[in-house]
């Protein structure tokens, strides 16, 4: 089997609601979902999920090669980006190709990827996470009631903008999830919007009222000293890592003892997750992948010894995409289809060259000018009631 080409497709996920975080809210309820289809000389296709705008720069590293040599091909792709560096969109591109290669490897073996990677159990524990900062209290409760119907007893809310609002929402979600657990796990994600002393004050105040399992990205992702300061100043665990690209970016945080929950972004690929998990395991730290369309890392999460909980952001699939998984008992139940279990209905999607991502001027992917520099947290948060 040899890789001979690729196709790029774009579809959409309909959230049916506004989504965002402390940095902003998306202008509409739809987000683009980028799909990469690697083709082979045996007529078997591999599917990767995630933007891959730099594929022309690294595809020659895998073209003509056997996809079953996936880890060697991963390193070859990283080496192709040696001078310019492999962070950012390049790392995402490598991750999408890596997913497609693992998909092909498992399909060649006739097995779902979770079984090929050595997992014993197809169930992946998870937590609910609705990217929910724009929802009013009623819509927030309704959203987490749907998660609760699938057995979830843990939830992560977006917050960090207004203390009273965050406290009220955490308590409301806790009450919803009590149908599944006496003491649900509650997490708060500030998306790098605080400075270190503000984070400690904010979280300490919340902890007088609610028990927080972790606080996520309280300060900038690379601020090892700041993360360590927060970690030692609050009771909650500190979770971070979803935006780090490469093992070398984790090293300063681990050396500073600055992280309790090691997170990994789904869009960075299977190989990256496996390597980060091994490094975290050597420090007796758990790993937790952040959510993404299709949850492709769930297959790898099932196979590592230190997986804690998988972020589940939605209960539906993108348009034209079938994913062989279910949500039950508060987690992801992986299916038996070979590979990642992702099937794409290309008749519904036009195969086009990967478009350059639009330049966003506001929203959750754009850092506000005064983020981390506010003496008083913002008191005005856009909600679904404003739509």
Image (cartoon, helix red, strand yellow):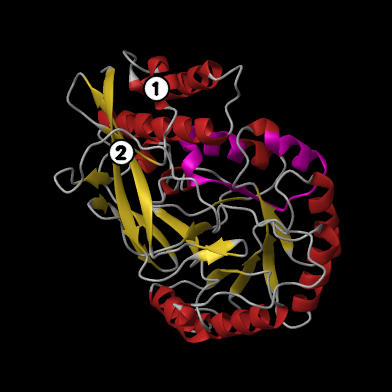
User: Going 36% across and 29% down the picture, which residue do you hit?
Assistant: 101
Mark 2 lies on residue: 339
Check the picture and name the quadrant holding the N terminus.
Answer: top left
Mark 1 lies on residue: 56
Residue 183 occupies quadrant: bottom right
Q: Position of residue 76 (x, y in %)?
A: 49, 17
- Residue that protrudes farthest toward the left in the picture: 347
Q: Is residue 128 visible?
A: no
* 251 drawn magenta: yes
* 339 drawn magenta: no
**Residue situated in front as seen by the camera: 346 or 315:** 346
- In this view, 246 is above or below 232: above
Q: Is residue 293 left or right of residue 222?
A: left
Task: Sort mark 1 into few (<14), some (14-19) or many (20+) by Cα contacts within 10 Å.
Answer: few
**Residue situated in front as seen by the camera: 238 or 165:** 165
Q: Is residue 129 left or right of residue 29?
A: right
Q: Is the Cβ of the residue at disc 2 closer than 8 Å to that at disc 1?
A: no
Q: Earlier in the sequence, mark 2 or mark 1?
A: 1
Q: Position of residue 337 (x, y in %)?
A: 25, 45
Q: Secondary structure of the magenta portion, mostly?
A: helix
Q: Is residue 71 left or right of residue 4?
A: right
Q: Is residue 268 left or right of residue 342?
A: right
Q: Position of residue 68 (x, y in %)?
A: 36, 22
Q: CA distance from mark 2 to mark 1?
A: 25 Å
Q: Which residues are magenta?
A: 249-277
């Amino acid at each position: 089997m040899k890789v001979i080409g690729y196709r790029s497709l774009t579809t959409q996920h309909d959230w049916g609601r506004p989504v965002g975080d402390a940095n902003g809210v998306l202008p509409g309820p739809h987000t683009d979902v980028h799909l990469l289809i690697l083709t082979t000389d045996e007529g078997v296709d591999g599917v990767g999920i995630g933007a891959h705008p730099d594929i022309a720069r690294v595809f020659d590293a895998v073209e003509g090669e056997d996809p079953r040599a996936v880890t060697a091909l991963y390193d070859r792709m990283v080496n192709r980006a040696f001078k310019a560096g492999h962070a950012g969109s390049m790392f995402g591109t490598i991750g999408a190709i890596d997913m497609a290669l693992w998909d092909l490897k498992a399909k060649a073996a006739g097995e779902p990827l979770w079984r090929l990677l050595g997992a014993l159990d197809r169930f992946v524990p998870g937590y609910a996470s609705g990217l929910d900062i724009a929802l009013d209290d009623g819509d927030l409760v309704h959203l987490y009631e749907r998660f609760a119907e699938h057995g979830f007893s843990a939830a992560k809310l977006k917050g960090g903008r207004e203390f009273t609002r965050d406290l009220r929402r955490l308590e409301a979600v806790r009450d919803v999830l009590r149908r599944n657990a006496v003491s649900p796990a509650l997490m708060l994600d500030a998306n790098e919007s605080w400075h270190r002393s503000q984070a400690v004050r904010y979280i300490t105040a919340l902890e007088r009222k609610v028990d927080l399992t972790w606080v996520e990205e309280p300060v900038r992702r690379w601020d090892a000293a700041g993360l360590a300061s927060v970690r030692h100043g609050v009771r909650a665990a500190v979770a971070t890592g979803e935006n780090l690209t490469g093992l070398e970016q984790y090293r300063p945080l681990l050396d500073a003892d600055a992280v309790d929950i090691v997170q990994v972004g789904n869009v960075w690929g299977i190989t990256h997750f496996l390597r980060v998990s091994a490094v975290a395991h050597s420090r007796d730290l758990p790993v937790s992948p952040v959510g993404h369309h299709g949850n492709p890392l769930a297959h790898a999460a099932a196979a590592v010894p230190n997986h804690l909980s998988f972020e589940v952001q939605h209960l539906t699939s993108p348009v034209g995409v079938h994913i062989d998984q279910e949500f039950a008992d508060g987690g992801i139940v992986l299916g038996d289809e070979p590979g990642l279990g992702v099937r794409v209905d290309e008749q519904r999607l036009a195969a086009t060259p990967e478009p350059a991502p639009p330049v966003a001027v506001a929203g959750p992917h754009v850092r506000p000018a005064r983020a981390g520099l506010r003496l008083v947290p913002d008191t005005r948060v856009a909600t679904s009631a404003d739509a």
